[in-house]
Image (cartoon, grey):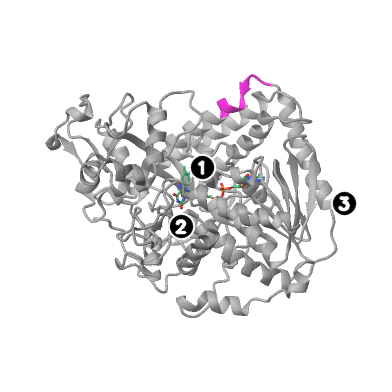
């Protein structure tokens, strides 16, 4: 596997401009000769489809949901970063770049992250032009708030519904192109395999989720924007349809999978409350702007929070990380919450929760102001927990929320498979070992609106495309493989539900590959996962048939892929002989129990290549070169 990141030479500030100038262009009349498939209609996919169609390419867009508007991006709450520096508090493109590199614990590519910071301001202008109702200051300027890992306020927001508003913008642009005939929309389709011709990705096979029919679609290039794989942990803040299937099947066809063990555990989720729960709910990080996180000083303190006096509370983030306080980054805040609970200071019925308290802010700013900033989040909390967070502090605990790992891509967002581009959370590109809050929306929209429309022209204009249509043997083979897998799943007729396998897998991964990892635990998890995978293929029950709407069948295929991906995650965690960002191996920690990096031996992207059924994935690495930033111990103290 060749890993050429294709990072342009020259000064950091000029790399993207220079690269765009050097990329070959497709002239306007020729654009309509090219067909591009986009899979996914979250922020990355919807913005890419709309922008590519606007340029004149013929686009086919696919998604699992009944409407593009229901992609998981709709759930994003807190905001989107940009280096506008409206509050005049010292922000700049360089600071956003540096914060992101440092936030990712120096495990991301400089050139990609700098481009992201440069592009951030264009995104805000574009979204304002679309009419996104961002919050505004009294004078009319867009308002900003702070997110973790930054000491400036650079997060643009629309109350606690930023993802929904941004997605409505991208969706409107997409539907405009559907109406103009430039985009053909295929909802309720699931990508189950890719078709490769002479090593080039030339199309895909999808299952029509309503009829069960397998369909083939050919194109000149395929863009995956299929989101993250955090549901490998079963309980997570993701939408229920989020999965790894598209990325994993591309991996099986030869796309490298980068840093799969880099998974983000978000510190502020509503704690789990029972065994039969299928999902967790996020309380946005934005609440940490005004909320203070604390636990009782004494382990085992059962008093109600109102009855615990100030001097008997430990505002542990403010104590341990005085410079960033409650806005310490997610990996650090999550581990700190776990550590407090491990010491017996956790609260609530399970002892696996800490308080997020807005009482001071309500006293200082008044209830009306807090309601204006976070009203919908408070409402959500009250509905789920049955307590009024205006009166009683919220209880929160870390949960799986985002994946920094994903398919490897070069500077043009192309995977190791020619013709397969990967955008948004599905790629690994910009966040290193830990993503900062409000940076996923920024990356998804940067990729979709600004990077791919430029980068793809270089590929299309510089590549020879033999005539290929859906009757090519590559499509027949891909379809036959998909049909065989579906049939195999339906034939087992075992005794355990798909969900029970998924829950067990989640428990294993959470226990051994979650916030804290050890070599013994990871090795044990590999055996447990292998056993579970073996049992799955003998004892899973998938009711119904292939010929109709069958969500058990859909789910079975996704869980089968999670069961395989889990092993690649565990291998990756074992191979990374350091702690960095979200990856905390207990053997590598400082005296203060912080992550201990090894910049001499581990400053690389780990990329895994599929080696065939039952064989261990093959390791490759892309060295990370830091020309413009000095590697430093990450400190938020
Ligand atoms: C509760 C919550 C709140 C968040 N808040 C914020 C925030 O405030 N700020 C921020 O920056 N980030 C936030 N994030 C993260 C952010 O929302 C996501 O990282 C981002 O929206 C992902 O966008 P995407 O376009 O890459 O993928 P997604 O939005 O996940 O879209 C994936 C698309 O791919 C399709 N798809 C998937 N698999 C297949 C397949 N096999 N075949 C066909 N189609 C497929 C789906 O149908 C969907 O259309 C939040 C995340 C969560 C869970």
Q: Which residues are magenta?
A: 494-501
Q: Position of residue 191 (x, y in %)?
A: 70, 45
Above or below residue 630? Residue 154 is above
Q: Are marks 2 and 1 in contact (CB under 8 Å)?
A: no
Give the image quarter of residue 169. Answer: bottom right
Q: Which residue has dot 1 on it?
A: 230
Q: Quadrant of the C terminus?
A: bottom left
Q: Nearer the viewer, residue 114 or 386?
A: 386
What is the C-alpha distance between the residues marked 1 and 3?
A: 36 Å
392 left or right of 78 in image: left
92 left or right of 619 in image: left
Residue sitting at x 62%, y 70%: 454
Badge 2 or badge 1: first in the primary sequence: 1
Q: Is residue 68 magenta?
A: no
142 left or right of 412 in image: left
Query: What kind of element bears circle 1?
Result: helix
Q: Nearer the viewer, residue 30 or 524?
A: 30
Q: Which residue has dot 3 on it?
A: 471
């Amino acid at each position: 596997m060749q890993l050429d990141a294709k990072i342009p030479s020259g000064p950091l500030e000029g790399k993207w401009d220079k690269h765009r100038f050097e990329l070959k262009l497709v002239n306007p009349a020729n654009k309509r000769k090219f067909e591009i498939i986009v899979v996914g209609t979250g922020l990355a996919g919807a913005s890419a489809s709309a922008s590519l169609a606007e340029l004149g390419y013929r686009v086919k867009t696919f998604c699992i949901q009944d409407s593009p508007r229901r992609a998981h991006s709709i759930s994003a709450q807190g905001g989107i970063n940009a280096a506008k520096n409206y509050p005049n508090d010292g922000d700049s493109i360089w600071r956003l770049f540096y914060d992101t590199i440092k936030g990712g614990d120096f495990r991301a590519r400089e050139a990609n992250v700098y481009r992201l910071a440069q592009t951030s301001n264009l995104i805000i202008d574009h979204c304002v032009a679309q009419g996104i109702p961002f919050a505004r200051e009294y004078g009319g300027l867009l308002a900003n708030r702070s997110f973790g890992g930054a000491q400036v306020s650079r997060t643009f927001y629309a109350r606690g519904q930023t993802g929904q508003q941004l997605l409505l913008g991208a969706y409107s642009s997409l539907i405009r192109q559907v109406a103009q005939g430039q985009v053909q929309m295929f909802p309720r389709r699931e990508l189950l395999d890719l078709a490769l011709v002479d090593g080039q990705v030339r199309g895909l096979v999808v299952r029509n989720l309503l009829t069960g029919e397998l369909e083939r679609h050919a194109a000149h290039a395929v863009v995956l924007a299929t989101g993250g794989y955090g549901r490998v942990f079963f309980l997570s803040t993701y939408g229920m349809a989020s999965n790894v299937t598209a990325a994993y099947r591309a991996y099986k066809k030869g796309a490298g999978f980068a840093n799969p063990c880099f998974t983000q555990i978000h510190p502020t989720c509503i704690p789990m409350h029972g065994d039969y729960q299928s999902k967790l709910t996020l309380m946005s990080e934005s609440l940490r702007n005004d909320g203070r996180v604390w636990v009782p000083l004494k382990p085992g303190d059962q008093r109600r929070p109102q009855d615990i006096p100030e001097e008997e509370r430990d505002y542990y983030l403010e104590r341990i990380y005085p410079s960033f306080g409650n806005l310490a980054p997610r990996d650090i805040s999550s581990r700190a919450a776990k550590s407090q609970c491990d010491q017996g200071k956790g609260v609530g019925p399970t002892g696996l929760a800490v308080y997020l308290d807005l009482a001071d802010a309500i006293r200082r700013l008044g209830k009306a102001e807090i309601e204006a900033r976070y009203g919908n989040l408070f409402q959500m909390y009250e509905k789920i927990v049955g307590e009024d967070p205006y009166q009683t502090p919220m209880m929160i605990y870390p949960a799986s929320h985002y994946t920094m790992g994903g398919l490897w891509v070069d500077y043009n967002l192309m995977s190791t498979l020619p013709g397969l581009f990967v955008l948004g959370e599905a790629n690994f590109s910009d966040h290193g070992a830990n993503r900062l809050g409000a940076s996923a929306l920024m990356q998804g929209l940067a990729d979709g609106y600004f990077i791919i429309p430029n980068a793809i022209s270089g590929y299309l204009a510089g590549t020879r495309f033999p005539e290929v249509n859906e009757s090519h043997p590559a499509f027949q083979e891909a379809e036959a493989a998909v049909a065989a897998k579906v049939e195999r799943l339906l034939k087992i007729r075992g005794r355990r539900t798909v969900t029970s396998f998924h829950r067990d897998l989640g428990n294993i991964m959470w226990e051994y590959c979650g916030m804290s990892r050890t070599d013994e635990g990871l090795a044990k998890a590999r055996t447990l996962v292998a056993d579970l995978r073996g049992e799955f293929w003998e004892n899973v029950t998938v009711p119904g048939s292939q010929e109709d709407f069958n969500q058990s069948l859909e789910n079975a295929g996704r869980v089968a892929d999670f069961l395989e991906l889990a092993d690649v995650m565990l291998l990756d965690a074992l191979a990374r002989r350091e702690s960095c960002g979200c990856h905390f191996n207990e053997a590598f920690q400082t005296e203060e129990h912080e992550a201990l990096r090894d910049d001499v031996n581990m400053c690389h992207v780990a990329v895994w290549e599929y080696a065939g059924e039952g064989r261990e994935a093959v390791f490759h690495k892309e060295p990370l070169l830091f020309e413009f930033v000095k590697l430093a111990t990450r400190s938020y103290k």
